[in-house]
Amino acid sequence: MEKTFLMVKPDGVQRNLIGEIVSRFEKKGFQLAGAKLMTISRELAENHYGEHKERPFFGELVNFITSGPVFAMVWQGDNVIATARNMMGKTNPSEAAAGTVRGDFAVNVSNNIIHGSDSPESAVREIGLFFKEDELVNYEKAISSWI
Ligand code: RTP
Ligand code: MG
């Protein structure tokens, strides 16, 4: 079953959007495999966003993502990586469609509420960075056959 890493960023936690975001993915039909409230170290932030190391906004991005608690999650389901990206909306909230998390709740690109893995490779990498294997739960839901 495909898995992805999603995270409510510090702005989403401060704005009380954890429940709203979890609810959207739950109602869509995806299954939660792991979750925790945590504060990200600078080392983890620099590793997680390593692909952006040379970009001008890297310092600001690391400062932001370490500035307060985040809600880290692993979700699973058919095509969950691409579907979650669609449900998040475009990186810049001014371009994100209404009905997406960023389109509904965010205004600027630095404070865009949610992170989601952008490919199968980054999903595996990011799940490994944030979760130990025994923090993920495998279980069957009777409802699965209806989705
Ligand atoms: P994320 O990794 O956080 O899920 O966001 P994303 O894939 O949609 O966007 P990405 O290109 O990976 O950029 C990572 C985060 O960097 C910030 N950013 N700022 N100032 C800027 O021009 C700029 N561009 C990107 C955003 O907060 C973005 O989510
Ligand atoms: Mg990204």
Image: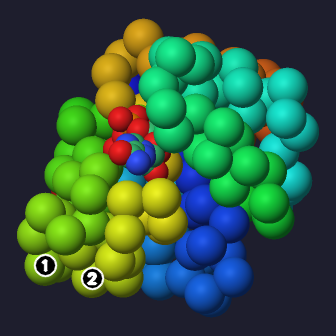
Q: In this view, does 109 lie above or below 128?
A: below
Task: Mark 1 and mark 2 in contact? Answer it, CB < 8 Å.
Answer: yes
- Quadrant of residue 59 within the rendered picture: top right
Measured Cα–Cα span from mark 1 to mark 2: 6 Å
x and y percentages locating residue 1 in the rendered image: 39, 27
Dot 2: within a 10 Å radius of its alpha carbon, few (fewer than 14), some, or many (20 or more) residues? Answer: some
Give the left or right position of residue 65, taking residue 119 as reference. Answer: right
Is the CB–ligand 1 distance for label 2 below 8 Å?
no
How is colour applied across the structure in the image?
A: rainbow
Any part of residue 87 in sight: no
Residue 67, how many percent across, how many down?
A: 80, 60
The amino acid sitting under disc 1 is: Ala
Quadrant in which residue 2 is drawn: top left
Circle 1 residue = 98
Quick one: which residue is furthest to the front in this view? 56
Number of disc labels: 2
* Callout 2 amino acid: Asp
x then y, percent, for residue 112: 43, 64
Mark 2 highlights which residue?
104
Quarter of the rendered structure image containing ligand 1:
top left
Answer left or right for 84 relative to 128. Answer: left
Image point (49%, 66%), residue name:
111
Q: Which of 101 and 136 is in front in this view?
A: 101
Near-viewer residue (17 or 34)? 17
**In this rendering, does residue 110 appear at all?**
yes
Measuring from the top left, give residue 53's x and y in whole percent.
57, 19
Q: In which quarter of the image is the C terminus?
A: bottom left
